[in-house]
Amino acid sequence: MSKAKLNMRQERFCLALSEGLPQSRAYIEAGYTSRGNAAEVAAARLFRNVQVQSRIAELQAGAARRSEITVDDLVAELESMRKLAMACKNPAAGVAAVMGKAKLLGLIVDRAEVTTTLRKPARQATDETHMTLEEWQRRFATN
């Protein structure tokens, strides 16, 4: 069933359901208005529509196809790219493939080290550039 037979709100309802929203929430997100329990009742009625059911099945099938790619598939693909890079005598591409595999498998995690310097304003001019916290508190603590 093509999506051409659905109106815009019905299509949005189907998309919201395929993203995992509950029926009543998908109904409201699609642009329908309702009060109280009317959203649940109307959403259930819309969900029983044959064209809506067909469209939801299409969307779910597409999501299932996309999720068939696994980490093992990606590792195998990177391994074949590494072999091709070595056969073409292109070590940079081979290294990139090995690094991609390592990142995919969690062996390499990109991290950035963050260091901070704590600076506190002085009430008096000072020539000292480094003070411990205790020195600072002794010198500038309020009495």
Image: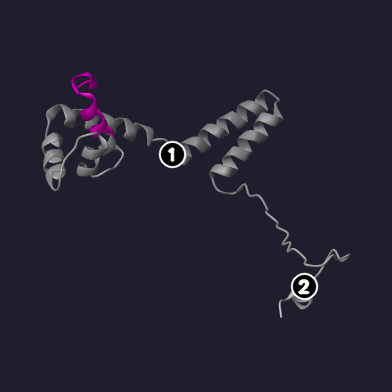
Q: Going from the N terminus, do you reach mark 1 or mark 2 first?
A: 1
Q: Which residue occupies 12% across, 31% down? A: 49
Specify the farthest residue to the right.
127
Amino acid type of the residue tagged 1 in the rendering: Thr
Amino acid type of the residue tagged 2 in the rendering: Trp
Residue 2 relative to residue 83: left or right: left
Numbered range of the magenta stretch:
1-15
How far from the left and from the top, in percent, is residue 63?
A: 33, 34
Q: Secondary structure at mark 2?
A: helix
> Disc 2 marks which residue?
136
How far from the left and from the top, in percent, is residue 3?
A: 23, 22
Q: Which residue occupies 66% across, 29% down? A: 93
> Disc 1 marks which residue?
70
- Residue 127, quarter of picture: bottom right
Q: Dot 1: within a 10 Å radius of its alpha carbon, few (fewer than 14), some, or many (20 or more) residues? A: few
Colour approach in the figure: one colour
Q: Secondary structure at mark 1?
A: loop
Which quadrant: the N terminus? top left
| Front-most of residues 130 and 97 | 130
Majority SS type along the magenta span: helix
